Image (tube, rainbow, N blue to C red):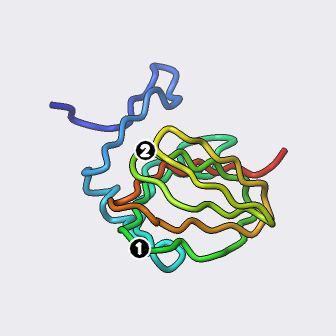
Amino acid sequence: MRNCCISRHSEGRVGMIVRNLNDPEVIATTYRAHGGGIARMVLTSQFMEGIEFLAYAFLPQGNTLEAHIDPVEEIYFILQGGGLMRVGDEENDVKAGDAVWIPAGDLHSLTNNTQEQTVVLVIAAYPR
């Protein structure tokens, strides 16, 4: 059983960070994501340099992450389920194991058209 989720090196800098989806501080970040999804911020820029956040999102069957634009580039990694992904003027069916790169400033959405919940790992960073 771990006692903390952030370790410190002897020089005072942060070492390894371990956070679980069920840690109280992660559960407290749960929010409605773009209309139809629910997400939790697992790690944020508070802990990382270069990456804005790592989020775990799920989209119930038939729901849609509504079309939106973010100032960050994102990677949606589909862990379970799938759906119809739209980025700009393009659309593709996506499934578990697919990674989708979304450029900053591009309109995008994801519709779960499968028979199960879709689970997505979202990684976001500001473009260089």
In this image, 128 relative to 16: left or right?
right
Look at 63% across and 47% down and name the residue there: 75
In this image, 19 relative to 111: left or right?
left
Residue farthest bottom in this picture: 35
Cα separation, mark 2 vs mark 1, equals 17 Å
Indicate the amino acid at tag 1. Gly
Q: Quadrant of residue 128?
A: top right
Using a 10 Å C-alpha cutoff, classify the residue at mark 2 as few (fewer than 14 neighbours), some (14 to 19) or many (20 or more). some
How far from the left and from the top, in percent, is residue 29?
Answer: 39, 64
Look at 34% across and 62% down and name the residue there: 115
In this image, 102 relative to 12: left or right?
right
Mark 1, secondary structure of its residue: loop
Indicate the amino acid at tag 2. Leu
Q: Disc 2 marks which residue?
A: 79
In this image, 56 relative to 100: left or right?
left
How far from the left and from the top, in percent, is residue 109?
Answer: 62, 68
Q: Is residue 71 above or below residue 17?
A: below
Using a 10 Å C-alpha cutoff, classify the residue at mark 1 as few (fewer than 14 neighbours), some (14 to 19) or many (20 or more). some
Instruction: State the residue in front, 81 or 51.
Output: 81
Q: Earlier in the sequence, mark 2 or mark 1?
A: 1
Q: Which mark is residue 106?
A: none
Q: Which mark is residue 62?
A: 1
Instruction: State the residue in front, 76 or 80.
Output: 80
Look at 44% across and 74% down and name the residue there: 63
Residue farthest right in this picture: 128
How far from the left and from the top, in percent, is residue 99?
Answer: 60, 42
How far from the left and from the top, in percent, is residue 36?
Answer: 45, 76
